[in-house]
Image: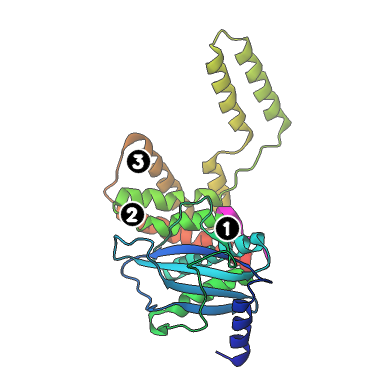
Amino acid sequence: MSRKKENNRIVIRDSTRRRPYGAKLTLLLEDNRKFKIDAECSLLVSPEIIISIKPSSALPYLDANCWDICVDGFATAGEAELYGLKVAFGFLWGAVRSQYSARLIYHTPLPCTVYDRNNSSGIGMSAFCTVSMEYGIKNVIEPVDEIISSKKELDHRLLVAVEIFTSAKLETTERSKFVGLISAIEPLAFQERYKDREIDSLIKNFKSQIDLSSLDQPLKDSMKGRIDQLKVESVSKAIRRMIKEKLPGDNDSLQIIEEAYGLRSKILHEGATDADLQQKSQEVESVIKKLIEKYVQDLIN
């Protein structure tokens, strides 16, 4: 590390009054993916941000490959939360890019927790580290640096999609793994609202007919609520449109997702299964990985 970077890191570490806020998250990696981190590692990934990584005790009952990750150096809690989410996404993006499984461990509304370095205990920052590069730690840090260097706002739906996707392979059964993988596509597909006035007129007339019927009021309210859903396109249509936009001309990917989405519905609503579920999971994983890569390229370019 250059003397300038080392000095910047010391300044950030010691500036608890001017940059009091940080964010913390915990990441669980699959067992067969080991990164040798024997002590706390602190990395300067931008001129004003430090990321520290250390083995976590979040799952003491398991011999888990688990990290505590802190990002420090922010003047406001909002800024710490913003970059905490970007760091969380960056680590998950690294898992997608290098094709291994990972899961964020949290029991709060967001996957990262903001803290005040002046009032917190137990979340320290050291100026030295022990890292073995031979286990690919660089492949983890580079994707994080890509994401936090972007000036664009992180879409929370993209974070949800990648969170579901990277954790799906950690499921213990083929059905739960398959359902997790195909479900990761839903947050990526934004459902557009229909702007056709004729559709609005039809919905309004249908609601009027329901009000004039002899049905019980709770049933009337339920039916009118479901009719309102006709104002936006279905999830399946949104998924088809999204795939055509992101992967133009890739009819194989479209067919794989359409068949997989239909099978997901049968699994969830009929308790069905499929003899080729493992192969179909691999196909779905490949397609969604390509879609995530497209979204990330839009984010970082």
In this picture the colour scheme is rainbow
| Residue nearest the observer in this picture, 18 or 161 | 18
Find disc 2 in the rendering and name its residue: 171
Mark with earlier residue (2, 1): 2
Quarter of the figure with the C terminus: bottom right
Residue shown at the point (43%, 50%) measured from the top left: 182
Query: Residue 66's x, y, as percent?
Result: 38, 66
Mark with earlier residue (2, 3): 2
In the rendered structure, find residue 170 and report the number of the disc placed on it.
Answer: none
Query: Residue 124's x, y, as percent?
Result: 51, 72
Stretch of the chain drawn in magenta: 152-157
Residue shown at the point (31%, 55%) measured from the top left: 278
140 left or right of 295 in image: left
Mark with earlier residue (1, 3): 1
Query: Residue 264's x, y, as percent?
Result: 39, 43
Find disc 1 in the rendering and name its residue: 246
Residue shown at the point (64%, 33%) measured from the top left: 231
Q: How many labels does the image show?
A: 3
